[in-house]
Image (spheres, helix red, strand yellow):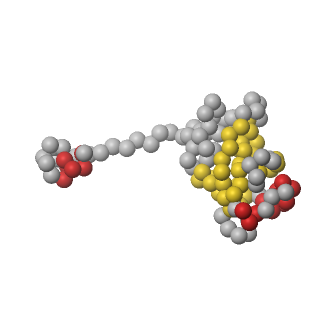
Amino acid sequence: LPLTGGTKMEIRLDVLASIAAAGGDPRFGLVTARFLHQVTGQAVDADMSFEDATCSKVVGRSPTFRNFAAGDVLDVQLAMNGRSFKATGRSVTLFSKPMTKIGFLYVTSPDDFGWTFQHNM
C-alpha cells in the first residue's frame, strides 16, 4: 500500500468464514479493516464494503499512514462491528509513491480577457 493513501484496495479472502468467526452478518455490507504495525503496534483503520453479494472480497480506499515509513510491514485485521477485530493472516508492505506533477501551458497571455484569462481565474 502507498503511504499517501487514496488508492483502491481489495482484500480477497474467505470473508464469510472471517465474519462468522467475528459473529457478524455480511448483509450489513460494511467492514472495518485495521492495519497493525508489526513492530510498534500502531493501528490505522479503514472503512470498506463488500463488492458483491458473494462476499468474496471487500473494497475501499487506503488510508494515509502517518508516522510510518516505506518498507514497514502491517498485519491486516477485519471487523464487522468496528470493535471485534479478527486476524486475517495477511500482511501488507508500505511503499512510497512519487508525487504527480501537473503543469499548464498557456497559448496566449493570461491578461488577454478571453479564454486564457477565464481559465486562469
Q: Position of residue 20 (x, y in %)?
A: 85, 60
- The residue depicted at 76 percent of the width and 42 percent of the height is 75
- The residue depicted at 14 percent of the width and 43 percent of the height is 111
Above or below residue 40? Residue 4 is below
Q: What is the quadrant of the C terminus in the image? A: top left
Q: Position of residue 101 (x, y in %)?
A: 40, 41
Comparing 14 with 29, the one in front is 29
Q: Is residue 74 visible?
A: no
- Residue farthest along the left direction in this orientation: 112
Q: Position of residue 14 (x, y in %)?
A: 80, 60
- The residue depicted at 72 percent of the width and 33 percent of the height is 42
Comparing 35 with 49, the one in front is 49
Above or below residue 21? Residue 102 is above
Q: What is the quadrant of the N terminus in the image? A: top right
- The residue depicted at 13 percent of the width and 46 percent of the height is 112
The answer to whether residue 109 is left or right of residue 79 is: left
Comparing 22 with 89, the one in front is 22
Number of marks in the image? 0
The answer to whether residue 84 is left or right of residue 92 is: right
Q: Quadrant of residue 29?
A: bottom right
Q: Position of residue 59 (x, y in %)?
A: 65, 57
Q: Quadrant of residue 92?
A: top right
